[in-house]
Image: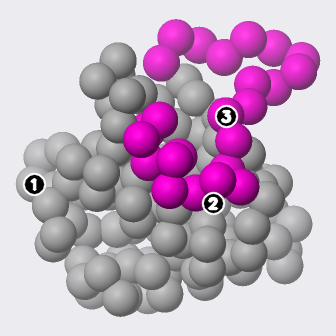
Amino acid sequence: MSRFDADEAGDRLALAVDAVTAHRERGSEGAVFEGVDGDRTVRVEYADRLFTLTVSAEERGALDDHLGTFPVFKLKQPETRKAPEGTVHVSAIADAKHAADFLEGTFRSVYDLPADYELRVVRV
């Protein structure tokens, strides 16, 4: 694994914390994370304390359950436009550690990736 990917839970959390922190410090457009398991790749974007996810109807139910464990995270739609079908925005007013915990849980419980999935940071 390199500086921009990790496949163990603790390393994935540290990588996500570093990416969120770097995004905030740089004021970048956002961080893009990919959860990879074999041929399957799932993408989650994080920018300005907002996660953007694309979910199926089944995954949406799992996301609602996941949000129940993170009460400060809320569903939010941008005021200026309607999100495309399946796109969900989650307001994440939290420190980098809680954002990383939410991201890890999203890949594991919403997208049902296995414990050894690979997390990649493809943009910060």
Q: Give left or right: position of 98 versus 112.
A: right
Q: CA distance from mark 1 to mark 3?
A: 30 Å
Q: Callout 1: few (<14), some (14-19), or many (20+) C-alpha neighbours within 10 Å?
A: few
Residue 119, percent across and down?
34, 68
Residue 41, percent across and down?
27, 46
* Label 3 or label 2, whichever comes before in sequence order: 2
| Residue at horizontal 34 percent and vertical 44 percent from the top | 110
Q: Which one is in front, 67 or 49? A: 67
Asked whether residue 57 is drawn in magenta, I would say no
Q: Which one is in front, 8 or 105? A: 105
Q: Is residue 25 above or below residue 106?
A: below
Q: CA distance from mark 2 to mark 1?
A: 22 Å
The amino acid type found where label 3 is placed reads Leu
Q: CA distance from mark 3 to mark 2?
A: 19 Å
Indicate which disc residue 75 carries: 3
Q: Callout 2: few (<14), some (14-19), or many (20+) C-alpha neighbours within 10 Å?
A: many
Q: How many marks?
A: 3
Q: Which residue is mark 1?
A: 38
Kindly check if marks 2 and 1 are in contact, taking CB atoms under 8 A apart as contact.
no
Q: Is residue 90 above or below residue 102?
A: above
| Residue at horizontal 58 percent and vertical 57 percent from the top | 70
| Residue at horizontal 10 percent and vertical 54 percent from the top | 38
